[in-house]
Amino acid sequence: MFKKINEPMTKKKKTTSRLGLILTSWLLFISFLIGVIELSSFLAYSTIFKSFFSVSHIVEQQNDLFEIKVDTLTANNKSDCVIHPYYGYAHNDNFSSMFPPQYATDSAAELGFYSPKSLTPFDHDGKFILAITGGSVAHLFASQASSVLLNFVKKLPEAQGKIVELFDLANWAYKQPQQLIILADLLHRGARFDLVINIDGLNELTLSSANARGGVSPFFPSQWETAAAVMPSKAAMEAYGQVALLQRWRVTLARSFRAWPHDPFLGLTWRLLDVTLAKQIVALRTQATSVSQARPGDAIRLSDNGKIMLGPNRWIDPMDLADQAVASWARASAIMADLVRASGGRYVHVLQPNQYVPDSKKLTLAEKNVAYLSDAPNKSLVEQGYPLLREAGIILQDCGINFIDMTMVFHDVDASLYEDTCCHFNKQGNELLAAAIGRALASPPPADMILSLGKLERRLNAPSFFDHARLLRESTLDVDLVQEASVSRLTSTGLADIEGSAEARWRWGMGLATVLSFSLPGAVPVTLRYALASPFADQEVTVVFNGQTLDRQTGIARTDQLVAPPATAESHFTLAGKSGENTLELRYRLANGPEHVLTPGETRPLAVIFRQLRLTVEHPESCRLADTPSSQVP
């Protein structure tokens, strides 16, 4: 009887034991799977963004997004700005109160800037007044790197023993002549600045172009047609609406994922989603720029309600627009310099860096993911316009203006600095720029002189000034075809695909010749460097440039190593480039085929293995056109 009673209990215990074992096994498996996912996510994060997963960094990035505005531009006005009678628009946080505070003096905030401090009248006793002007890059610079800059400024002889006060007079999307107009207005109100640092360059190119596409004068405030219009186009409204929605999603995602900042998988997921949304926003903002067709007979374009002027209705060739924008930028800077000098201060003009300036920085993988678009609208404008800005900067220097070209300030920096596809860099980038500007300030300024605007104008209007700048731009080429598969402005035949790994790369030259063709705007020198190996004994390589034989290497030793072989033949020399199409040929005596079989089954006409095939188009000062040396322009 006892046996019968115990049997069900024993079976129940065995069943419970088996269920417990199964449950434990599943829990262990799930724990193992979660561990694998977390470890994989940690490694993937490090690989994609080129930095180790950091809880503090994730939280910092998510917190930054909470400050994001719904959009920099809405249907009727700037959401972060209000229309200003002189400046175009100004920061609006100080104008939102029904009963605004009463200021005893004109504060910077009351005038629409990012500071509550008094602007006028200045109490100069024991003070050194520093102002930063420009667009969003200048504003972020003033916000994030002021302490670094002030450490240098305090050491200036004229600032010794004084309290240094910094005023941020920059704003999002400001461009010349807004900086000039703001400075003139503040000086006429009684403000005095000991040092004005103007950081600009990009907006003058890109936003002027956007204005022109929108049917607005390039020299009006950015996107003035949208600020002035009663009702933007349907396409623009739809794009702005999508941008606002995507930005809200970015903020919502950041808030949702912030609760789990320690989790690598969730951190990776959030970063990938955020990057995707950010790229979509850039594309939509570009799409939102309307294109207005000029109507014959219209001298002045007006807003849709006919009440706000949009500027002269002119079609401007994109290249001519770059010329005009750069000339306007240089004139505005020169006038600012004179105004500051006349009021007893010092003016410094800084050309801002940008990730689309060729060879200005080796972008990290993280930067390529979040801060670079190969088809970004800014890219071609920067490539076309920055050589003009740099050339005009040389003229400003010649005229005695303290102009500092900072386009290469990040050239040797391996860290990730750029944080969006436009132009902005992170705190580290701003601090590096501040340190570079600070070191430049320590150098003696140019000899004090009164700038002749007539002299500047003659220099800018010299027939070959922009021609020379274009020569510099279009001549620039430095490419190793073993490292880069395709390059704009250069076509090739007789080259196989790039082979290799992270440690080494190589590329086969095929057939009886490798031919490279490229166009040059003038007679500039071209440097050829190559290093190669050959699988054939007694291989010969002949270099022919524009139909002229320049070099021949014979008796090149054979190599049996067909994977990343060391070079057995190297050479480099300078070619005399010509205006127009140039053709470089590397001809080979032997190539794989019926007469010279390399290996059975190999059908490609392999001839040599390149370890380097580099072309550098240089533009020394000797390339300056003969009729435009600076000394000839009074």
Image (cartoon, helix red, strand yellow):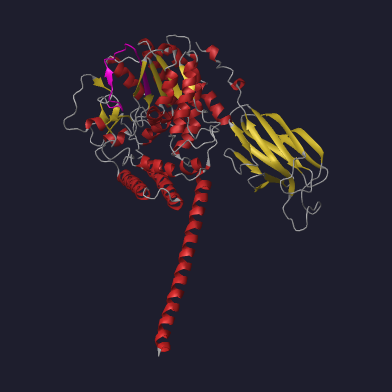
Residue 358 locus on image (x, y percent) = 54, 33
Image quadrant of residue 316? top left
Magenta span includes 126: yes
| Residue 331 sits in quarter | top left
**Magenta span has 316?**
no
Residue at position x 75%, y 58% in the image: 601
- Residue 310, position in %: x, y? 30, 31
Q: Is residue 242 above or below residue 624?
A: below
Q: Nearer the viewer, residue 368 or 164?
A: 164
Q: Specify the quadrant that holds the N terminus.
A: bottom left
Q: Locate residue 139 relative to residue 393 in the image: left or right.
A: left
Question: Residue lying farthest bottom?
Answer: 1
Residue under the image location 18 percent in, 29 percent down? 100
The stretch of residues the image draws in magenta is 112-132
Residue most toward the left? 99
Query: Residue at left 57%, top 17%?
Result: 627
The answer, for residue 591, to whether it is visible in the render is yes
- Count every numbered label the image shows and give the total: 0
